[in-house]
Amino acid sequence: AAVNRPSLGERRSAHDRSRRAPDDQGPDRGLAAPLPDMSDVGAYAAAEGASHKRKKARAEAYDKSNLRAEQYVLDREDDAFEGRRGLTRQMAKNKGLTPHRKKLARNPRAMAREKFRRAGVRLSGKGAKAGAGNSAAYGGEGTGIKTNTVRSRKFK
């Protein structure tokens, strides 16, 4: 079921109109910026010059780093044709494609601790814990001692 509502652009312009201050209702909508104080023209020029120098230095540093990277790649390509390539760590381990493993799998002690914790969680649901709840002091056998039952051996 399609909802009949204005487009996003119409909603956004209506929102902007509702948020506009009352003094901004004129044709220029208050977009004209105040003129800067012309007494500090020298300070503005100095700040602009410093900014320009900073940007230029940053661009030159970027160009130098790119040039170094390109040179490194070219040097590596030249070295590639000089005999056999060296053994890398990945080649030495020769693991191939292995599945992703959890972080705990790397530490056997921590894995055993986690298994113990999980076993405790499983067992916690099986029955009431000893000493849990409102247990009073021991009140003896509830049915008393049966005199006619013998479950012991006589000593000689």
Image (cartoon, helix red, strand yellow):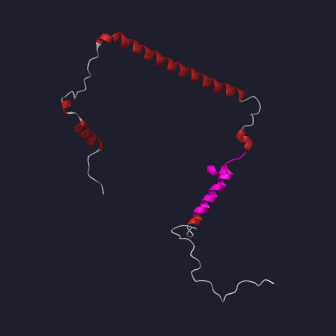
* Magenta part of the chain: 94-121
Looking at the rendering, which quadrant does residue 82 occupy? top right
Is any atom of residue 100 visible in this view?
A: no
State left or right for residue 113 relative to residue 3: right
Tell me the quadrant of the picture where the N terminus can be found.
Answer: bottom left
Q: Which residue shows up at 59% across the image and 22% down it?
A: 67
Residue 128 lies, with reference to residue 111, above or below; the image says below
Looking at the rendering, which quadrant does residue 69 occupy? top right
Q: Nearer the viewer, residue 80 or 53?
A: 53
Let me know if residue 115 is in the magenta part. Answer: yes
Q: Main secondary structure of the magenta part?
A: helix
Residue 91 lies, with reference to residue 141, above or below; the image says above
Tell me how many marks there are. Answer: 0
Instruction: Point out the residue furthest to the right here.
Output: 156
Instruction: Point out the residue furthest to the bottom here.
Output: 148
Is any atom of residue 109 visible in this view?
A: yes
Residue 97, horizontal then vertical, whole percent: 67, 48
Q: Nearer the viewer, residue 153 or 65?
A: 153
Looking at the rendering, which quadrant does residue 125 occupy? bottom right
Residue 120, horizontal then vertical, whole percent: 60, 62
State left or right for residue 106 relative to residue 53: right
Q: Which residue shows up at 50% across the image and 17% down it?
A: 57
Residue 101, horizontal then vertical, whole percent: 63, 51
Residue 5, horizontal then vertical, whole percent: 26, 49
State left or right for residue 99 relative to residue 54: right
Q: Nearer the viewer, residue 110 or 98?
A: 110
Let me know if residue 120 is in the magenta part. Answer: yes
Q: Which residue shows up at 40% across the image and 12% down it?
A: 46
Q: Nearer the viewer, residue 14 or 75?
A: 14
Tell me the quadrant of the picture where the C terminus can be found.
Answer: bottom right
Residue 5 lies, with reference to residue 139, above or below; the image says above
